[in-house]
Amino acid sequence: MQLTDKEIVEFQRIYEKEFGVKISKQDALEQGTKLLVLMKAIYQPIPSQGHKIPQKSSPKQ
């Protein structure tokens, strides 16, 4: 995955806003890429066929 210069600058802006720390373009590239890899690994769409979303069971009385 490759981030564009515009995306790197945006990541730097968001990082500074959230953490109050300025980071270099190299650090932003590395951290932004790691974030994208993580999101790709954990974010999976819910299949529309063959799988049901589990329902919460009501407490037995």
Image (cartoon, helix red, strand yellow):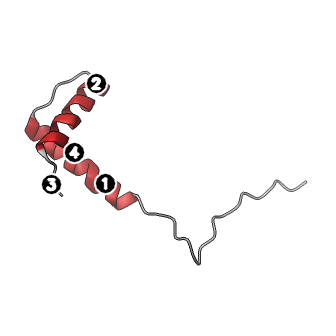
Question: Dot 1: what SS?
Answer: helix
Which disc, if any, is residue 54? none
- What's under tag 1, amino acid-wise? Leu
* Residue 45: image location, x then y, percent: 46, 63
**Residue position for label 1:** 38
Between discs 3 and 1, the one toward the N terminus: 3
| Cα–Cα gap, marks 4 and 2 | 15 Å
Question: Dot 3: what SS?
Answer: loop
Using a 10 Å C-alpha cutoff, classify the residue at mark 2 as few (fewer than 14 neighbours), some (14 to 19) or many (20 or more): few
Between discs 2 and 3, the one toward the N terminus: 3
Between discs 4 and 3, the one toward the N terminus: 3
**Residue position for label 3:** 2
| Cα–Cα gap, marks 1 and 2 | 21 Å
In the orientation shown, which residue stands out farthest toward the right? 61
Residue in the picture at 43% in, 63% down: 44
- What's under tag 2, amino acid-wise? Lys
Using a 10 Å C-alpha cutoff, classify the residue at mark 1 as few (fewer than 14 neighbours), some (14 to 19) or many (20 or more): few
**Residue position for label 2:** 17
- Pick whichever, 3 or 53, lies toward us: 3
Residue in the picture at 52% in, 70% down: 47
Between discs 1 and 2, the one toward the N terminus: 2
**Residue position for label 4:** 32
